[in-house]
Image (tube, rainbow, N blue to C red):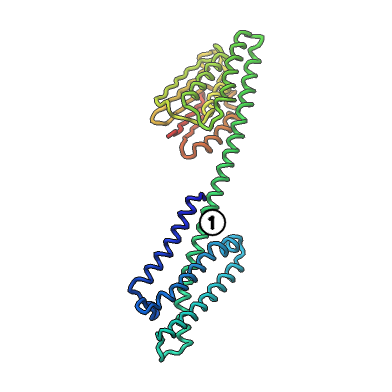
Amino acid sequence: MSKTKLYILVLAHLLFWVLNYVYITTGNLTWMGFDNDSGSLAIVYNYGMFFNAFLCYIQVFWLVPAFFIKHKKVKFWTYSLLFLVGITFVESYLDTRVAIHYNLLDSAVSLPLVIFSVFVQNAFFHVLYSVFGFLYRFLFEYRKSERAKQELLKETHQTELKYLKAQLNPHFLFNGINSVYHLIGNNNALAKDTLLQFSGLLRYQLYESSEALIDLEKELDYVSQYIRLESIRKGDDISVTYTIDFENTSLKIAPLLLTPFIENAFKHISHHDEAKKNTIVITIEEAQQKVQLSVQNSTDQTLQQQSFGGVGLQNVHRRLALLYPEKHDLKITDEKDFYNVDLIIDLS
């Protein structure tokens, strides 16, 4: 708690007791025969307010944190009851003495009965203030516990996100090196160009995407470069069509969320003899602060028997759940000849 909040809290408590005292001692009030005209009410309320405050704050500063919160319930109830009974007895004795001094007792009523009546009425207020102190500290501890849980959950999520993001670089690096490897010897010029573009994409992953959120425009530019790189690598064996369109340049998005779905399409595209049957259609649109990704790739009977996904998709599934809970919609369908991914992320 900051010093400013602490000062405000202390001032609020002091103000409560001061206003309470002023209201009781200046109004036209009576209690058990004590009144302000004779001055007796102010006397009994002076020590009465002290006892009430004591019972309240002993719960706040000692009994609840030292015993109740630490599950020492027997000690808590024992000490609470001892303080309650002891202080109620002392105040009742003092009230009786003041009543005798001001001749407020009815001679027809026995003194033990008077003391018992005063004890019961004092006990009611003492229980009230003790319960208030208990609830005040208990709710404070509950809120503190909830904040600690939220911080722990946030820290756990951040650690998990860092781990998941760290997995992307080796995964991407492995795929890129593998692509260049297959080009070497077959088309060295293309291998060099691919390696150059690959180094640019890797630089983006290592340095530019280190923030939790990045400009949507930068991310989509990275996606566009990735698609061009994969298209060059695949050459004339496939047909790639992609459209990227966005209207809000100020939006930000968690980096490297869209690429795994596109990477998966290139990885699992069909291998028909006719290139025009091996198709990938990618559409990315942003409107009204929502990004919609649609990826469709052709498949063949052999690929349908394989398991789509892997580290990349498992990773991005988990990242979406952590980063955009209740703010994303992912649908993946495996049809006879096509594999479809539809993803909507609300960036508002």
- Is residue 34 visible in the rendered image? The answer is yes
- Is residue 310 visible in the rendered image? The answer is no
Left or right of 276? Residue 72 is: right
Closer to the camera in the image, 181 or 219: 219
Query: Which residue is rendered at x = 46% and y = 24% of the image?
Result: 217
User: Residue 141: where, in percent of width, then height?
Assistant: 54, 56
SS of the residue under disc 1: helix
Closer to the camera in the image, 180 or 211: 211
Is residue 48 depicted above or below 163 in this figure? below
User: Residue 220: where, in percent of width, then height?
Assistant: 48, 23
Q: Amino acid at mark 1?
A: Glu
Query: Which residue is rendered at x = 64% and y = 19% of the image?
Result: 177
Q: Quadrant of the C terminus?
A: top left
User: Residue 116: where, in percent of width, then height?
Assistant: 48, 83
Query: Which residue is rendered at x = 52% and y = 60% of the image?
Result: 137
Is residue 98 depicted above or below 180 in this figure? below
Is residue 1 depicted above or below 195 in this figure? below
* Residue matched to label 1: 141
Is residue 121 depicted above or below 153 in this figure? below
Dot 1: within a 10 Å radius of its alpha carbon, few (fewer than 14), some, or many (20 or more) residues? some
